[in-house]
Image (cartoon, helix red, strand yellow):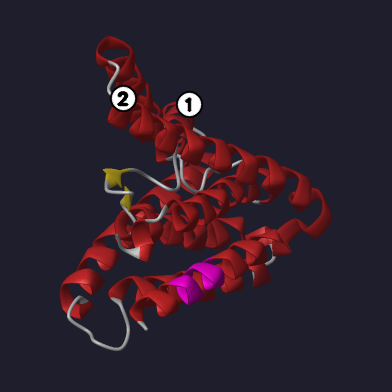
Amino acid sequence: MQTSESFRLSAILSFSGGLQDAYTYNVRGNVFANAQTGNVVLMSQNFMTGNWSNGLQYMFPLISFIAGIFITEQIENRCKHFKRLHWRQIILLIEIGLLFIAGLIPTNVNIAANMLVSFTCAMQVQAFRKVHGYGYASTMCIGNLRSGTESLSHYFRNRDKAALHKALHYFGIILVFAVGAGAGGILSNLLYDKTIWLSSLLLAVVAVMMIKENS
């Protein structure tokens, strides 16, 4: 199994994902970095009530998320045969840099910061899609919740230990995401706009873990 699919690495990514969502919501104007469904709802609601400026603060991160998915797919296609540097490490380095820049952006330019965080979230969810061979998302919960509950139901019907093992992986990832979100909420009150630098640090740890795999 690749290090990029290990539970330990996936847990670090999920913790970082939860922290990022808490950061943009608490520090950057109640916008979601990862939960684009929430942004679509709030964008549409504001546009339809004539609050165009408020709607734009949700629309731009959504567009940025789409761009992040697109660019990550392009990078994977162009760089997947690189020998010295894995394409996922390239993604991580871009994420680390962009999140560091986000922490430097003043709070009167929240749209720019939210766009950067949403872009990196999209890169992460596109680049890291499996934990122990199971498809998952490290920056959101709804898919993991559905898959985990489905596997748990399968276990109770068939007593299939593999299904229980799968369910525990999904619920474990959700728990770590929740802890990351909680920590992000607390740290946002202490570090404020610099809280996002902790995600850069966590992603740097993930990059080092992957270097050990390549060596």
| Residue 102 quadrant | bottom right
Residue under label 2, please give it: 151
Seen from the viewer's position, the closer of residues 166 and 94 is: 166
Task: Decide if residue 179 is in sight here.
Answer: yes
Can you say which quadrant of the picture contains the C terminus? bottom left
Could you tell me the amino acid type at mark 1? Thr
Left/right placement of residue 44 relative to residue 11 reads left
Kindly identify the residue that appears in the image at 16 percent across and 72 percent down: 77
Residue under label 1, please give it: 49
Left/right placement of residue 173 relative to residue 182 reads left
Percent x, y of residue 187: 76, 51
Seen from the viewer's position, the closer of residues 208 and 44 is: 208
Mark closer to the chain start, 2 or 1: 1
Q: Main secondary structure of the magenta part?
A: helix
C-alpha separation, residue under disc 2 versus residue under disc 1: 41 Å
| Residue 154 quadrant | top left
Which label lies toward us, 2 or 1? Answer: 2
SS at badge 1: loop
Stretch in magenta: 203-209
Percent x, y of residue 29: 64, 46
Which residue appears farthest toward the right when viewing the image? 190
Q: Residues within 10 Å of mark 1 (few under 14, many from 20)?
A: few
Percent x, y of residue 71: 27, 67
Task: Decide if residue 29 is in sight here.
Answer: no
Kindly identify the residue that appears in the image at 70 percent across and 46 percent down: 183
Q: Is residue 112 above or below residue 144?
A: below
| Membership of 188 in magenta stretch | no
Left/right placement of residue 155 relative to residue 211 reads left
| Residue 121 quadrant | bottom left
Percent x, y of residue 155: 31, 19
Can you say which quadrant of the picture contains the N terminus? bottom left
